[in-house]
């Protein structure tokens, strides 16, 4: 990307989008355009096409989406599927219609089969069934990355996709009904500590293995790929390291300073038993993650405390 190129980042208020903007500015890119959901509803095709026609961005990072943890995905599958498919299709189509030089589509590691061989390689997509608790979201993301692939094949576009593992970090969503596992634990243990609650309950039995990537590491990869990768196959974004949910809970509790007992509600779903991405493709291109998990959680907790201090209740 040229330093003065016009760059559109969708979802700029979210964790991934805001991290991408920080990384772009760190690298000297200043001509960045954004729109809030109130200013531009990407589920509306006419509005999306008008925005691209008027603004003519040269490069696009599509980080917008309706996101949430296992509870939200399981409770609202129709909403997750509709919102994410419509946003992806409208934005990608408008980008093609308006001759965007390059687009990067951000997906999720949940696109891969529930029982995929570990670590999960990019080429195992659609080999077998998806995890049912987030199937709707996964199908929406698969549709987006496949549309990019088909446009490349049919029209010669340069549209790429990246599939991040579980993200955490600044500007996360701490709503217990909608959040992912990491922010949910941070908030749950913080509130238990403040209220001097002797026991805190987490979902499942703690056995699933998960990989986590700090948001700013993902942003660095996103900009790196925009400048150094073209191709139809997606690229995994992860740390290459995994931890059990039980050990994660103990680590988060230690960082937060919660000393009570952690209980497990086995009536709640575990989700996929193991999900570790094969990140050898990104490594071969020249990128590896930098932020250690414990350091990243400490930074995420500091971010959470800032929202507490400012009485920002929107996401709490």
Image (cartoon, helix red, strand yellow):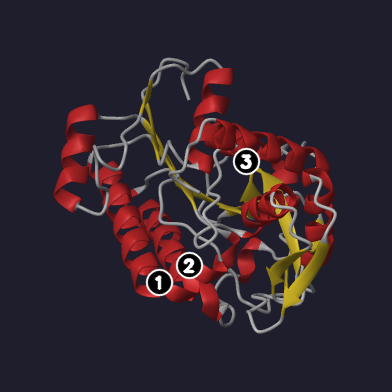
Q: CA separation, marks 2 and 1?
A: 6 Å
Nearer to us: label 3 or label 1: 1
Instruction: Give the Cα separation between the discs numbered 2 and 3.
Output: 21 Å
**Residue linked to disc 3:** 215
Relative depth, front residue between 67 and 164: 67
Query: Considering the numbered disc 2 on the image, is that residue within a helix, a strand or a loop?
Result: helix
Q: Is residue 190 above or below residue 76?
A: above
Q: Nearer the viewer, mark 2 or mark 3?
A: 2
| Point 31% across, 30% down: residue | 57
Which residue matches tag 2? 72
Q: Give yes or no for contact between labels 2 and 1 (Cβ–Cβ under 8 Å).
A: yes
Q: Which residue is mark 1?
A: 76
Task: Pinpoint residue 24: horizontal percent, then vertical percent.
Answer: 53, 25
Neighbor class of circle 3 (other Cα within 10 Å; few <14, some 14-19, many 20+) is many
Q: CA distance from mark 3 to mark 1?
A: 25 Å
- Crowding at dot 2, Cα within 10 Å, few <14 / some 14-19 / many 20+, comes out as some
Marks 3 and 1, the one that precedes in the sequence: 1
């Amino acid at each position: 990307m040229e330093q003065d190129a016009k760059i559109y980042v969708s979802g700029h208020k979210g964790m991934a989008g805001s991290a991408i903007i920080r990384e772009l500015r760190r690298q000297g890119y200043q001509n960045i355009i954004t729109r809030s959901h109130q200013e531009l509803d990407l589920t509306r095709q006419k509005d999306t096409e008008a925005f691209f026609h008027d603004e003519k961005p040269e490069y696009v990072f599509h980080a917008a989406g309706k996101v949430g943890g296992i509870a939200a995905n399981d409770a609202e599958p129709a909403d997750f599927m509709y919102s994410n498919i419509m946003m992806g299709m409208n934005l990608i189509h408008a980008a093609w219609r308006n001759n965007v030089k390059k687009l990067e589509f951000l997906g999720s590691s949940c696109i891969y089969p529930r029982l995929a061989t570990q670590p999960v390689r990019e080429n195992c997509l659609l080999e077998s069934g998806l995890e049912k608790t987030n199937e709707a979201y996964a199908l929406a993301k698969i549709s987006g990355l496949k549309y990019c692939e088909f446009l490349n094949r049919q029209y010669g576009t340069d549209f790429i996709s990246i599939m991040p593992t579980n993200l955490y970090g600044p500007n996360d969503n701490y709503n217990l009904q909608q959040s992912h596992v990491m922010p949910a634990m941070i908030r749950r243990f913080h509130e238990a500590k403040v209220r001097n609650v002797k026991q805190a309950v987490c979902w499942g039995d703690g056995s699933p293995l998960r990989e986590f990537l700090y948001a700013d590491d993902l942003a660095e990869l996103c900009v790196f790929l925009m400048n150094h990768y073209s191709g139809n196959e997606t690229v995994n974004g992860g740390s290459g390291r995994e931890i059990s949910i039980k050990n994660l809970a103990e680590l988060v509790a230690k960082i937060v300073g919660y000393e009570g007992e952690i209980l497990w509600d086995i009536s709640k779903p575990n989700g996929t038993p193991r999900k570790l991405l094969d990140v050898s493709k990104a490594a071969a291109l020249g990128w590896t993650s930098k932020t250690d998990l414990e350091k990243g959680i400490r930074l995420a907790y500091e971010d959470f405390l800032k929202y507490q201090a400012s009485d920002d209740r929107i996401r709490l």
